[in-house]
Amino acid sequence: MSVILNEVRRATYLDSIVLMRISRQIAALPGVEEAGLIIGTPANKEILRDANILGPEGSAADPGDLIIALRTSDVRTAEAALAEAKRLLDQPSALGTTAAIESSRTVRAAIQRLPEANLALISVPGDFAVAEARKAMELGLHVMIFSDNVPIADEATLKRTARDRGLFVMGPDCGTAIIGGVPLGFANVVPTGDIGIIGASGTGIQEVSCLIARAGRGISHAIGTGGRDLKAEVGAITTLMAIDALDADDRTKHVVLISKPPAASVARAVLERVAKSSKPFTICFLGATDFALPANARSAGTLKATAELVVGGIGAVPANPRLLQSNGRKRVRGLFAGGTLCSEAQIIFRQAGLPVMSNVPVPGASPVTGTYDGHVLIDLGDDEFTRGRPHPMFEPGVRDAPLAEAIADPNVGVVLLDVVLGYGGHPDPAGHLVARLANRDGRPVIVASVTGTDADPQPRETQIQKLVDAEVIVAGSNADAAEAAIAALSAH
């Protein structure tokens, strides 16, 4: 019979990424069925309850407390796992991070230790993110809010306040930025250059910046806005401020804007501001084409097309015809860590005239139903998969069960995957993936793209070689991978 063990550390707070990494490490111990280290907010306790790892002590935790929650095969295993969790919490350098050792308990204390800082990165549960952002703004700091689950009304209010003070708020739910060559959140190591990016999409910024880097060009700044900035409720406050900033930046010669389709009124305001700029723009409103562009802007339908418009042709890596055979199976299952990469793949399918379903459907795609009857592309980084769990970009195990299901499905001819590299990501996502592809008996065909550069902590060529050795077809971009998946359906 399984054992549930909780321990609560009162008034203890750690970065959510650190906690998720410790949770992952504890969950991998023999005999541990489930593990969660999480701040004791009501929403988080509900997550632990749903996972059947919340005991009476955890239930009594306050929102400022840290809960260590375990479910194991026996008492001895539970006690050993708890001891290891406490060791990691007390010695976070064992995880390769000095976050807790060097962190301060308040924003004010942090700015006293680093008075030259001008930006605060907020990575706390959404319930606390607005308050922490306000504290940072009171100290004159720009803010990047990594946290999600922040009400959109609070986002709008926060951004209006920041704008009045001349400060940026990137986010909430802003995973990627590159400011003055410094990568923040999930970002890649790319050269410094003359191309500025404004993105309401983290993996969109990553894919375009990496394609630009691999074409020999560089990035001045990549300003993340958060995925809801171009909604009517927010009114593109950060996007418009970012356009102003890049317009005034002499190093930036070309501006790229990436977003899902904005509200019509917001699109008009953004494009009116673009028209006043003397710089060329490339606009990628993924899934939308019905908007009039000013003379200094061009439209791109995909992330790859965006990079191509900026730097010229990028080309595609031809797939190995011997491998590109779906053996008569006619369905594609896409399992993505990057939400925008999932959207781009859907667009490729729609452009090919193929019906496609997704849990995050673009215009023209269908929402998933109870059964996967057709081509299905899933964003595993969506909230339904990550609430209280690690994002698949730093915990690739989130994809393990859906991947095993897709491989076992006799109707699935092609499994389409993304591998996203860079800071904040898993140290070896390709190695993790290859281990799950062993003994698949050659079917279905596995097609993948690798977003990253050779300068990333996980060098791209090394990651690609691991996939190639496992007979994974590796395409030159996410768009190329989607096209290869489609081609495999008709290959013989």
Image (spheres, grey):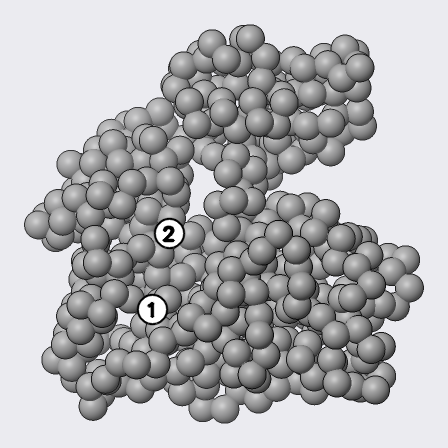
Height in image: 183 above or below 292?
Answer: above
Q: Nearer the viewer, residue 166 or 325?
A: 325
Res 199 → quadrant: bottom left
Mark closer to the chain start, 1 or 2 = 2
Task: Indicate left or right for 231 with 3 as reference.
Answer: left
Identify residue for label 1: 261
Identify residue for label 2: 174
- The image shows residue 434 at horizontal and vertical percentages of 78, 58
Q: Which-is-in-front pick, marks 1 and 2? A: 1
Task: Indicate left or right for 400 with 116 as reference.
Answer: right
Question: Is disc 1 placed on a helix, strand or loop?
Answer: loop
Q: Nearer the viewer, residue 464 or 402?
A: 402
Q: Amino acid at mark 2?
A: Cys
Q: Alpha carbon of mark 1 to alpha carbon of mark 2: how far?
A: 17 Å
- The image shows residue 186 at horizontal and vertical percentages of 48, 54
Q: Amino acid at mark 1?
A: Pro
- The image shows residue 366 at horizontal and vertical percentages of 51, 65
**Mark 2, other Cα within 10 Å: few <14 / some 14–19 / many ≥20:** many
Height in image: 107 above or below 85?
Answer: below
